[in-house]
Image (tube, rainbow, N blue to C red):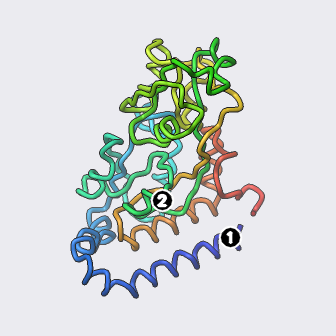
């Protein structure tokens, strides 16, 4: 684990150095971009808080029975912010407008099961990955053995959160070519549509299914379609494009929280230990 952390720190340092070496050319060719991110870390440090854009979904960020915000991402972000020396302040956002919120400085980062994609790397700065995920199909339990082929989806209504990894799967994977796709504004809404019978299948994050459709929950009558996994992916934290200093500090803090086994303990609490990308339990 120490060797892995050392290599990652070297890579982070190299990125920061390269970004610094190229700052003059970047400023001359794209002054607007440079101005929008110049001094972001000082701005965050001076106000003493990192404003984190989230949506509510278990087990990542959600309200407990006392109305308090909790979840894997909530606790993870709080520990990282402790390392950074700032307060973690959570701001609920419209996921469809997350980049607008970020660039307007309504929030300082997006930390809410954000899938790392090439497109997002072009528009935002993305941290080192810390967790794996995949997309799964959720349907009513009595239909779980039914939707196992593309032909079986003919005439079925499939829902997913707009501009999510689930939507990309539902719109581009050949498996769904016979289905009718409808976007909704959240993963929770996608599950509600299936539960109420207005949709047949929801394509959602596997991590959400862990805490949402288990026995004893409101969605215990729903089930994952076994053997149908899509779009294996990794999660990261997004900051404003070009903000290499803040990104570097978040990366270092993530590694520190993983290195002292705090990340593993939080993941175990939310039954996500098998998905984290730092195997600190065995010292690797």
Image coordinates of residue 113 in percent, x first then y, are: 49, 46
Residue under the point 53% across and 23% down: 201
Can you see residue 224? yes
Image coordinates of residue 263 in percent, x first then y, are: 60, 53
Badge 1 element: helix
Rounded to the nearest angstrom, the CA distance separating label 1 from label 2 is: 24 Å
Residue under the point 42% across and 37% down: 69
User: In the rendered view of the protein, which quadrant contains the N terminus?
Assistant: bottom right
Can you see residue 92? no
Residue under the point 51% across and 27% down: 202
N-terminal of the two: label 1 or label 2?
1
Residue under the point 27% across and 58% down: 103
Image coordinates of residue 26 in percent, x first then y, are: 31, 81
Badge 2 element: helix
Q: Give the total number of marks visible in the rendering.
A: 2
Q: Hey, which quadrant is residue 150 in on the image?
A: top right
Q: Give whichever of 112, 140 is nearer the camera.
A: 140
* Residues tagged 1 and 2 counted as in contact (Cβ below 8 A): no
Q: Which residue is mark 1?
A: 4
Alpha-carbon neighbours of circle 2 within 10 Å: few (<14), some, or many (≥20)?
A: few
Image coordinates of residue 117 in percent, x first then y, are: 49, 55
**Circle number at residue 118:** 2
In the image: residue 82, left or right of residue 284:
left
Measured along the vertical axis of the image, is residue 281 above or below residue 96?
A: below
């Amino acid at each position: 684990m120490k060797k892995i952390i050392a290599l990652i720190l070297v890579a982070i340092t190299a990125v920061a150095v390269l970004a610094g070496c190229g700052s003059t050319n970047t400023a001359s060719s794209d002054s607007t971009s440079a101005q929008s991110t110049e001094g972001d870390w000082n701005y965050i440090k001076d106000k003493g808080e990192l404003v984190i854009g989230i949506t509510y979904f278990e087990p990542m960020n959600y309200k407990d029975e006392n109305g308090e915000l909790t979840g894997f991402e909530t606790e993870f972000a709080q520990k990282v912010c402790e390392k950074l020396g700032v307060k973690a302040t959570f701001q609920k956002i419209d996921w469809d407008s997350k980049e607008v919120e970020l660039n307007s400085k309504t929030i300082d980062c997006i930390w809410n099961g954000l899938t790392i994609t090439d497109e997002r790397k072009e528009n935002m700065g993305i941290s080192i990955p810390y967790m794996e995920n995949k997309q799964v199909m959720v349907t009513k339990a009595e239909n779980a053995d039914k939707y196992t082929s593309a032909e079986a989806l003919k005439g079925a209504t499939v829902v997913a959160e707009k501009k999510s990894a689930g939507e990309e799967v539902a719109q581009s994977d050949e498996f769904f070519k016979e289905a009718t796709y409808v976007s909704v504004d959240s993963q929770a809404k996608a599950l509600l549509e299936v539960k109420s019978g207005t949709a047949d299948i929801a394509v959602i994050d596997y991590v959400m299914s862990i805490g949402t459709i288990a026995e004893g929950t409101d969605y215990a009558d729903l089930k994952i379609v076994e053997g149908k996994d899509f779009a294996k992916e990794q999660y990261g934290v997004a900051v404003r494009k070009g903000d290499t200093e803040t990104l570097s500090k978040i990366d270092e803090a993530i590694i520190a929280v993983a290195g002292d086994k705090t990340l593993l303990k939080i993941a175990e609490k939310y039954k996500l230990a098998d998905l984290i990308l730092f195997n600190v339990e065995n010292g690797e």
